[in-house]
Image (tube, helix red, strand yellow):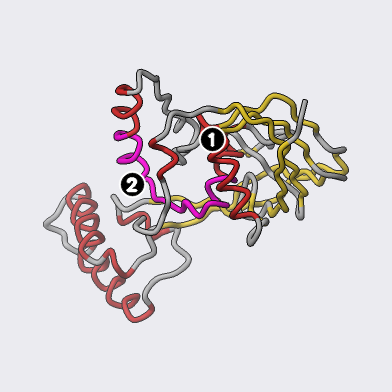
Amino acid sequence: MKNLDLSILAKIPEPNLDVLLEIEPLAPLSMVSELPGSYYKTLKSPDKKMLCGLFENILGWHIDLVDRKAITQELVAFRKKQKLEYKNEIKGSTYNPLLMDYFDIYLPVIPPQLNHYDDLWSRAFRRTDSYRHTFGTRYINTSFIERWNQIKERVDSDIKRKSTEKEGLKDRLFKRYMGNFPMYYSTPTKREFIQFGGNFQLKLSMDSCLFEQLETHLQSKNIGYLGSSEGWVDITIKEFAL
């Protein structure tokens, strides 16, 4: 956070520069807009929130949810002083975009779709409220496994406690030893992917400050990901005249 340049957020968004964004897929893409449950169906082209994530990734804005919420609260108050409305775009995922007001999509050109297929994707879950989280973890502190099994056996063999009391005690013990477990576990989830036979061309109206920052960063790093961490893309951006 200390080295990030977030100064653009202090200015009034003015998306009045015509920009051509070209995205070359380097791998099959899965662009899921909402949290769909058991099946992740892809969109045919990236939506605004995905492009926002792409831009923030290029700028190096790797900001966690807690800090993003704090920034958003400041932005709400700041936009109010500027007599502007700030729309919270967190719906659908825990990703809270910060640059949504600084560009608009008005003409996407979608490349031919060569192939559709479903694949299993590792969906990450976070669960720190219950010892049942340990049932789904692939990894654990190896020096702690035997001790943890002994702890659970002692609790389960206590005939003086009711089953609900045992569950509560194991939850409390899990939280005590939480550092020995990963805070996320994964489960295989069916996800749709598309292989494209060409490049996306998206005509955008963009704030000139955002364009300048992206142009600068893309000179040294023009590869990012779109839709998922497996969806690597090559990016170019330039001004164009209508």
Residue 95, position in %: x, y? 46, 41
Residue 192, position in %: x, y? 71, 42
For the point 41% across and 54% down, the residue is 4
For the point 61% across and 39% down, the residue is 51
The amino acid type, in three-letter code, at marker 2 is: Asp
Q: Is tag 2's residue or tag 1's residue first in the polypeptide sequence?
A: 1
Q: Tell me the crowding category of disc 1: few under 14, some 14 to 19, or many 20 or more residues within 10 angstroms, Cα based.
A: few
Left or right? Give the position of 215 relative to 44: left
Left or right? Give the position of 178 relative to 184: left
Marks 2 and 1, how far apart in space?
Answer: 22 Å
The amino acid type, in three-letter code, at marker 1 is: Leu
Q: Considering only vertical position in the picture, is 150 above or below 28? A: below
Residue 37, position in %: x, y? 55, 36
Left or right? Give the position of 178 relative to 193: left
- Residue 67: mark: 2
For the point 37% across and 43% down, the residue is 68
Q: Which residues are magenta?
A: 54-74
Residue at disc 1, secondary structure: loop
The quadrant of the picture occupied by the C terminus is top right
Observer-nearest of 143 and 55: 55
The quadrant of the picture occupied by the N terminus is bottom left
Spot the residue most to the left. 160
For the point 31% across and 71% down, the residue is 149
Residue 39, position in %: x, y? 63, 38
* Figure quadrant of residue 74: top left
Q: Tell me the crowding category of disc 2: few under 14, some 14 to 19, or many 20 or more residues within 10 angstroms, Cα based.
A: few
- Residue 35: mark: 1
Is residue 92 highlighted in magenta? Answer: no
Residue at disc 2, secondary structure: helix
